[in-house]
Amino acid sequence: MLEFIQEMWEIFHSNWQSYLDGTLNTLLISLTGTIIGLAIGVLVGVIRTIPFTKVQWKNWLIGGANRLLNAYVAIFRGTPMIVQSMVVYYGTSILWNWNMTPLQAAFLVVSINTGAYMSEVVRGGIVSIDEGQFEAARAIGMNHWQTMRYVVMPQAFRNVLPSVGNEFVINIKDTSVLSVISVNELYFTSNTIANTSYKLFQTFFVTAIIYFILTYTVTLILRAIEKRLDGKVTYELAGANQQQVAIIDRPKGV
């Protein structure tokens, strides 16, 4: 056991710079892809919740947009990211002569893949908001976009935050499939080290530890953010008499 730990340390010590580069690329791709994917998901989710109107041509436009967006979500949720990366990287070169670098293709694939999943998460968050709030917003003259911006999305964002964080953690692990297009992320780096050291188990055990540290750290940070958004456990309610203050303890988790 001691010898195994020593071999792991030697591998890490000899290749720490490569591990660091791969880890930074993994974080960069997953974080950027999650942020862009969330933006795509919000846009798609809001568009898919636009209500039909009495104007016929607007209904046709809304229906056509919904069909296109449904197809986008179905395709990218129904195919593996490893296949998408191959299609995007090689397909864009063959069809449109785009000479994308592996890193550019990685950003594109992770973003549009995450956007497909986030669109369903955002749509669910919007649907979870009470219908009475939509009616109240329409009653004071707000259109759909104003209702989403000022009334619905601030509440929906809190509801979907755990799912966004979960998607980020998933993206950290799923970037490993990008090694098929030679993206220099953590798995690709580890595979290179393993092929040169001929110590596959030790090398990938180090890789597993790094992945665990990344995902666990991100999970703790996201839980801290959620707790921060929940507000204080104790509220102070000041009545008419400013000298009388009521202290109310909010149960945890409420």
Image: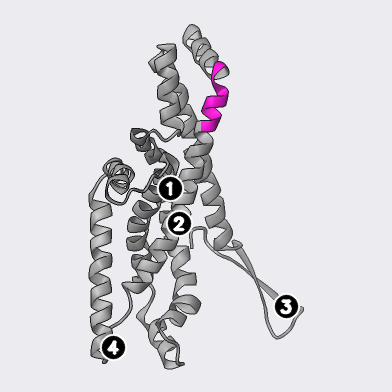
Q: x, y percentage for residue 120?
A: 32, 62
How far apart are labels 2 and 1 at the CA level? Answer: 9 Å
Q: Vertically, is 168 above or below 70? A: above
The numbered mark, 3 or 1, whose residue comes first in the sequence reads: 1
The numbered mark, 2 or 3, whose residue comes first in the sequence reads: 2
How far apart are labels 4 and 2 at the CA level? Answer: 30 Å
How far apart are labels 3 and 1 at the CA level? Answer: 57 Å
- Of the residues shown, which amino acid type is indicated by label 1? Phe
User: Looking at the image, do the residues carrying marks 2 and 1 touch, with CB atoms under 8 Å apart?
Assistant: yes
Horizontal side of residue 92 vs 175, given as left or right: left
The numbered mark, 4 or 1, whose residue comes first in the sequence reads: 4
Label 2 or label 1, whichever lies nearer to me, is: 1
Horizontal side of residue 13 vs 203, given as left or right: right
Q: Which residue is mark 3?
A: 244
Q: Vertically, is 197 above or below 218? A: above
Q: Which residue is mark 1?
A: 107
Task: Write down the region rendered in magenta.
Answer: 14-21
Q: Which residue is mark 2?
A: 36
